[in-house]
Image (cartoon, rainbow, N blue to C red):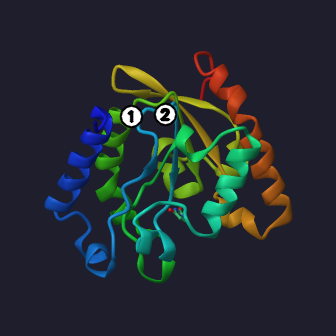
């Protein structure tokens, strides 16, 4: 039986297609990369946009960054099926360029709906592109790893901004910072009812 949340996510994916969202990116992409993992998860990871492997396979974080993400999940005692993984922009930008502000803006309402369906306790943004929408005006170098509480509908969400695995992959000190931040995530989730105020 398909889970109700997965069904709602499938409907949302169909809506993104039918609405003609980001047609310029869609025209050049192989797949709309909606997400992967467990729609019932307490933790949602949000990256930037699919790369080449993600576009080919239709799944987020399956290339080099994904391998690093999987390794950090394992070190934190988790597997991909314990979490849900998605991106702010759901089509691959040509040549892996940064997503444009208008592309992020077009996908933002669908990302919010995705979160309304999943109802996570904690959202982990990977890199500044997804962080800046949840925590406008903040700098990742100053707040990485710090849980922030934001209003979300009638409730709240805890956002934990982390560096993007791709940025940290080949930079030794950033890599260690990301791993250290990542390993604190299970504690943050445990305490997520009472995080530090943003
Ligand atoms: N980088 C991202 O931000 N997302 C992916 O899915 C893959 C690489």
- Counting other residues with Cα less than 10 Å from the Cα at mark 2, is it few (<14), some (14-19), or many (20 or more)? some
Image location of residue 8, percent across then percent down: 25, 39
* Front one among 26 and 59: 59
Name, please, the residue furthest toward the left.
18
* Front one among 179 and 83: 83
- Please say whether residue 196 is visible from this viewpoint: no
Q: Quadrant of the N terminus?
A: top left
- Verify CB contact (< 8 Å) between mark 2 and mark 1: yes
Name, please, the residue furthest toward the top.
194
Residue under pointer 1: 118
The relative height of residue 113 versus residue 192 in the rendered view (above or below) is below
Residue at 66 percent across and 21 percent down: it is: 190
Residue at 29 percent across and 44 percent down: it is: 9
Q: Quadrant of the C terminus?
A: top right
Q: Which mark is residue 41?
A: 2
Residue at 31 percent across and 35 percent down: it is: 3
* Front one among 121 and 102: 121
Element assignment for label 1:
helix
In which quadrant of the rendered view does residue 55 lie?
A: bottom left
- Please say whether residue 134 is visible from this viewpoint: yes
Query: Residues under labels 2 and 1: Cα distance?
Result: 7 Å
- Counting other residues with Cα less than 10 Å from the Cα at mark 1, is it few (<14), some (14-19), or many (20 or more)? many
């Amino acid at each position: 039986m398909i889970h109700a949340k997965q069904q709602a996510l499938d409907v949302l994916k169909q809506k993104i297609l039918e609405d003609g969202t980001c047609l310029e990116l869609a025209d050049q992409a192989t797949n709309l990369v909606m997400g992967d993992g467990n729609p019932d998860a307490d933790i949602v990871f949000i990256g930037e946009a699919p790369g080449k492997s993600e576009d080919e396979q239709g799944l987020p974080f399956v290339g080099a960054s994904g391998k690093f993400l999987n390794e950090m999940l394992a070190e934190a005692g988790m597997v991909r099926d314990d979490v849900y993984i998605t991106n702010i922009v759901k089509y691959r930008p040509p040549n892996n360029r940064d997503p444009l502000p208008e592309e992020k803006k077009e996908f933002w309402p669908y990302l919010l709906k995705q979160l309304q369906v999943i109802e996570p306790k904690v959202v982990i943004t990977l890199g500044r592109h997804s962080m800046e929408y949840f925590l406008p005006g903040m700098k990742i170098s100053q707040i990485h790893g710090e849980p922030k509480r934001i209003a979300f509908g009638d409730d709240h969400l805890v956002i934990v901004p982390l560096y993007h695995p791709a940025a940290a992959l080949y930079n030794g000190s950033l890599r260690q910072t990301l791993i250290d931040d990542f390993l604190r995530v299970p504690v943050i989730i445990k305490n997520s009812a009472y995080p530090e105020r943003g």
